[in-house]
Amino acid sequence: MKEELFHKHLFTPGPVKMSPEILQLGARQPPYFRNKYFSQLVLDSEAKMLDLVNAPEGSRVIFLTASGTGAMEAVVMNLFTTSQTVAVIDGGTFGRRFVDICLTHHIPVKAFKVDRDTLSDGRVSAKVPPADALLINGHETSVGHLYDLNCVGAFCKENKILHVVDAISMFGTDVIDMQSQCIDTLILSSHKGLALPPGLAFVVLSPEALSFIGKPQSFYFDFARHLKDGERGQTPFTPAVSIMIQLHARLEQLMDGGLAREWNRAAHIAAYFRSRIMDLPLEPYSNHMPNAMTALRVTNGVSALRLVEELETVHHCVVAPNGGDLKDTVFRVSHMGDMTVGDVDTLVHALRCFFEENK
Ligand SMILES: *Cc1c(COP(=O)(O)O)cnc(C)c1O
């Protein structure tokens, strides 16, 4: 096995650093799952997840063995038809992905952009075109922007627009509350905020969202089938059994201290990192950063891509590069997962060494 695959310090927006207890569970023999023990685990995971996101009474969770994009596509296929219109905030790679999914399935889509500085305040609402639903990436991970879900949710509710939130890269680090943020559909996945291995994605559907479900052009992603089997704690097809078990343990961890403790922990780590790099030639890319991540612009003319490469090869710290126009100027540091102040110190030290040699 190639040892260099296993980097020591992960600061990427997925996979993220996992806790030792959860990692150990992944080393165990996956059990058989068509039995009452596994059903109990699934039912309990659903109840815990609904509780953690404060889902309205009567909400359901669908467990998909797919990456997050699978859940994004499944939502579009099951909830919307070609005679509806959905609005999408095209704020980066992931907003664009929602647009492309709608185009693939011939769902009429109205994509709109918002000014980077106004991304997270109430003015987003003013830009939403008339539509049956709004698809939003709560944290647009490609540029590290956090939208104001309270404002957008209130607007959707007032205008009877279904509020669909991809919270993949904010669950566990930034506030998610289906009831107070008027969220009808929540999309989550295993390997970002939840700090599990990649492989599972989740869709939480409010009673309102459940009433949108139709007959999709898909066998594997047919929500009606998933919901029916889910009533007895089963999935229609083999789930990523080991990750389901790790998920249950992770939800127990989260229930233990409550999500607010996790939000505070992430806020602390993010603030600590940002305070330690003030004197380096770096500036935040967004004015509305989540706790989950810091996207940084390099201001001394050194290539961000080179920085990313050197941090990895010389200092064994893996941060995420940006693509497209931003590839030479911007990179991203994730604070998701089992991050400690010690991990942040390691990265800050690596950044200092890099800029010492690249003034
Ligand atoms: C990572 C991510 C996804 C899903 O990407 P996958 O490669 O399918 O895991 C979707 N939305 C956001 C905001 C993400 O950060």
Image (cartoon, grey):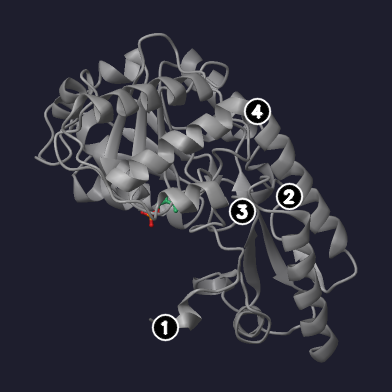
Q: Which residue is mark 2?
A: 287
Q: Is mark 1 within 8 Å of ligand 1?
A: no
Kindly identify the amino acid type of the residue bearing the numbered disc 2: Asn
Q: Position of residue 88 (x, y in %)?
A: 41, 41
**What residue is drawn where x is 50% and y is 38%?**
250
Query: Dot 4 lies on which element?
Result: helix
Are the two marked residues, 2 and 1, in contact with CB atoms closer than 8 angstroms?
Answer: no
**Residue at the spot of label 3:** 144
- Residue shown at the point (24%, 24%) measured from the top left: 233
Question: Between tags 3 and 1, which lies in front?
Answer: 1
Dot label at residue 2 = 1
Give residue 291's quadrant in the image. Answer: top right
Give the mark toward the camera: 2 or 4: 4
Circle 2 Cα neighbour tier, 10 Å, few/some/many (<14 / 14–19 / ≥20) = some
- Which image quadrant for residue 254? top right
Asked whether 357 or 15 is in front, the reply is 15
- From the image, tell me which residue sits under label 4: 257
Residue 121 placement (x, y as % from top left): 67, 34
